[in-house]
């Protein structure tokens, strides 16, 4: 919040600066009723446009969008904690969460009006769901693990709409899931 207050009037962080203008203009078009954003082709990923439009519609405030991004960044630390705890134990989880909280790059991207602001949250949420799925699957609770696999798939799918580069690692995770659980006797 301190960073938002300090940088909210910075000229390079306004809605009409650099790459931000593409997303803010498209989000404003969506808020104005053009939800299909047609006609036209765009070379940007769609999730952030609609995320920004969903916040701008009731608030008309870029500061509100930044505050929501900060809340998601804070939630990302919780996702990092959960994933690290499931894979490496509680001590590692605390170290990972503290290091993530102290990472200035996360804070910087949270105040930008760019898709990169959503990536830490989506990655942490997807990895936490995946870690829980594998942990629950190893405890022979297939129904619970399947729900976590679905949550991980949904999260990584949403992140693919925000940052398509995540789709290849997500595909590798799907293959690993079938290698790990596909040969289980029924």
Image (cartoon, grey):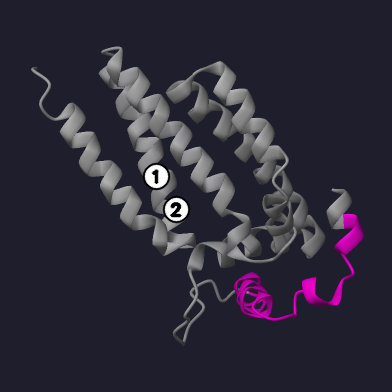
Residue found at x 68% / y 58%: 109
Estimate the x, y position of residue 96 in percent, counting from the top left. Answer: 60, 32
Within-10-Å neighbours for mark 2: few <14, some 14–19, many 20+: some
Residue at mark 2 to residue at mark 1: CA–CA distance: 6 Å
Q: Is 158 left or right of 71, judged from the image as shown?
A: left
Q: Position of residue 44 (x, y in %)?
A: 50, 75
CB within 8 Å, label 2 to label 1? yes
Is 105 rendered above or below residue 77?
below
Query: Vertical placement of 152 versus 23: above or below?
Result: above
| Residue 61, visible in the rendered structure | no
Which portion, as a residue range, is magenta? 5-32
Q: Main secondary structure of the magenta part?
A: helix
Q: Position of residue 157 (x, y in %)?
A: 39, 52
Location of residue 183 with respect to 186 vertically, above or below = below
* Residue 19 is covered by the magenta coloring: yes
Mark number, residue 6: none
Residue 158 badge: 2
Q: Residue furthest top?
A: 139
* Residue ID for mark 1: 154
Badge 2 element: helix
- Quadrant of the frame with the C terminus: top left
Q: Say what secondary structure mark 1 lies in.
A: helix
Q: Is residue 23 above or below residue 4?
A: below
Q: Residue at x 59, y 60 (%)?
A: 116
- Closest to the observer: 40 or 72? 72
12 part of magenta stretch? yes
Direction bottom: furthest residue:
40
């Amino acid at each position: 919040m301190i960073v938002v207050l300090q940088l909210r009037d910075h000229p390079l962080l306004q809605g009409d600066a650099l790459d931000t203008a593409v997303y803010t203009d498209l989000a404003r078009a969506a808020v104005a009723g053009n939800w299909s954003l047609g006609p036209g082709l765009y070379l940007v990923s769609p999730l952030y446009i609609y995320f920004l439009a969903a916040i701008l519609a009731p608030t008309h405030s870029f500061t509100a969008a930044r505050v929501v991004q900060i809340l998601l960044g804070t939630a990302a630390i919780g996702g990092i904690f959960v994933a690290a705890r499931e894979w490496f134990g509680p001590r590692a989880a605390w170290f990972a969460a503290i290091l993530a909280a102290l990472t200035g790059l996360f804070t910087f991207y949270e105040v930008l009006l760019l898709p990169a602001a959503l990536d830490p949250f989506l990655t942490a949420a997807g990895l936490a769901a995946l870690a829980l799925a594998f942990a629950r699957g190893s405890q022979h609770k297939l129904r619970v693990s399947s729900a976590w696999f679905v949550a991980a798939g949904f999260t990584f799918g949403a992140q693919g709409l925000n940052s398509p580069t995540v789709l290849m690692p997500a595909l590798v995770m799907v293959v690993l899931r079938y290698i790990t659980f596909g040969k289980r006797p029924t």
